[in-house]
Structure formats: C-alpha cells, structure tokens
Amino acid sequence: MDILESLFVALSTYSAIPVPQFNWNERNMKYSICFFPAVGILIGAALGLWNLLCRTLQFSSILFAAMAVCLPLLISGGIHMDGYMDCMDALSSHQSRERKLQIMKDPNCGAFAVIYCGIYLFLQFGLFHELYLQKGIVLSLPVFVLSRALSAFFAVNLPNARKGGMLCAYTQNADRRKATAATLLCAILCGALLLLLSVKAGLCILLGAVLCALFYRHLAMKEFGGVTGDTSGFFLQLCELSCLLAALIGVCLP
C-alpha cells in the first residue's frame, strides 16, 4: 500500500492527472521520487496515440506539432516549464547567487522568462514538426521518461541550494540509495529502448542527454550552489529539447 501511495503522491505532485490524494509522510515519501518517471510514461503514451491518430486520419504535420507541444504541458500541469522560466529569469539577471535564488522564488513573471519560454516553444514546435515529417516521433517517446529519471537522479544526489522548499521537502525522506538505483535503472532501460528502436538515432539522443546532464550539473553548482525545484524543471525541459534535436539529427544522418 505504501508503494501505491508513493505512486499517487508522485502523480499528484508532478502531473495534472486526477489521482487519490495522500498527505506526505515518511512512509509514502520514501520511494515517491522513484515514480517521477511514471509521468513521462503517460506523456509518451499520449504523444504516441496522438501520432497514431494523425497518421491514420492524415492530419497535417503542423496540427500534430501544435498538439505535441501542448500535451506535455497539459499532462504535467506546466510545473517544469514554470521552473524553466524562473531559472531563465534568474540566470538572465547576472546577479549574485543569493539574488538569483531570490528571483526564482519571486511569484512574478519577468520579461526574460516570457522571452525564453517563447523561444523554447517555437523550437519544440519546429522539432516535432520535422520529426513527424521524418517519421521519427516514436524515438521521442522514451525521452519524456529519460528526462525525468535523470532529473530525479540529480535531485537526490546533488546538494539542495536552499536547504528548504518543495524539492527539499519532497526528497528529504527519500531512500537515496534505492532512489539512485531506481532512477539509473530507468535511464538505462530508456537507453536500451532507444538503441533498440534505432542504434544511430538512439546514440545521438543518449549523447544529447549526457551532455545536457553534464552541463546542468556544472551550471547548478556554479550558479546556485546546488539544485532546487526550479533548476530541476529547467534541466528537464532543456534535456527534452536537446534530445528532440538529437533525435532529428540521428534520423537525418545518412
């Protein structure tokens, strides 16, 4: 029962899917972070069904891409895009570490957040459009699980920059050793699936994910002194965009 509660806590926290609600406690939070990638499974499944419907009914690539951009936001509730926007506001300020952390906590939306959100969505739309034309959408489906597995891995293995906040509350009772093993296993399984689908494109996607992970670790430690919920959302969004670009490169390589 504790495992089921942990799953529902993860889904209620990181998705807009209606599930039974439970108060956070030491028992159900022990493994909740391990179920974070389950949200990616739901997004991948929804995107796969949308791709199948568009192929069957011969919808245009533009309509496919427009809904493909919306689906992750609708299913996740936009929580990670919010973190990405807050992080971009902080990074664009070029202020001290302490001031950047304060900016990320500010509920007001800054100009840079809006600008970089627009840039992100335009790029994602273009990548989905091209992947649809290249019949490479299936390669993007595991990406939404992979990004969450890596985000969860960093959340439990890098220091918390604030020593408080939502991410700290979410991970403080986690079994870090088992969470690390579970998230790494999930990432490895995603990698194996990608290589099974296409060795060439799969290697490109995995390379993109690894480079993004290394960049994020350096950025988080240098700019913020660790991770927060916002930086985790920033990484997740950046990882997904990087992997979509890598998938397109892999599909288009001769």
Image (cartoon, helix red, strand yellow):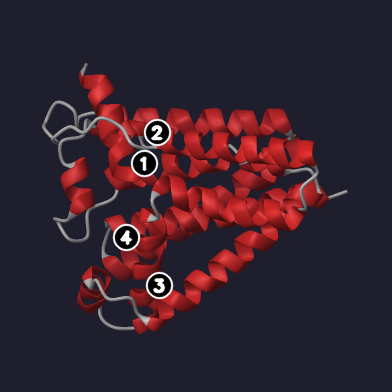
For the image, the number of numbered tags is 4
Question: Residue type at mark 1?
Answer: Phe
Q: With respect to residue 77, does 38 lie above or below?
A: above
Q: Is residue 221 left or right of residue 136?
A: left
Residue type beneath disc 2: Thr
The residue carrying mark 3 is 88
Q: Which residue is denoted by mark 2 in the rendering? A: 183
Residue 206: percent from the left, percent from the top?
A: 60, 43
Residue drawn at point x = 48 percent, y = 78 percent = 115
Q: Helix, strand or loop at disc 2?
A: helix
- From the top left corner, tell me how far across and down residue 33 is, in percent: 30, 36
Distance between the alpha carbons at the discs numbered 2 and 4 = 19 Å
Query: Which label was assigned to residue 140?
Result: none
Q: What whole-number distance in Å separates the C-alpha atoms at marks 2 and 3?
A: 26 Å
Q: Which residue shows up at 38% across the image and 51% down it?
A: 77
Q: Image height check: is 202 above or below 127?
A: above
x and y percentages locating residue 210 in the rendered image: 54, 48
Q: Given the image, on which type of amino acid does mark 4 rest? A: Asp
Q: Residue at x 53, y 48 (%)?
A: 71
Labels 2 & 1 near each other (Cβ < 8 A):
yes
Q: What residue type is labelled 3?
A: Met
Label 1 secondary element: helix
Residue 217 shown left or right of residue 156 in the figure: right
Q: Nearer the viewer, residue 56 or 2?
A: 56
Q: Name the residue under label 4.
A: 230
Residue 206 lies, with reference to residue 81, above or below; the image says above
Mark 2 → mark 1, Cα distance in angstroms: 6 Å
Residue of label 1 = 153
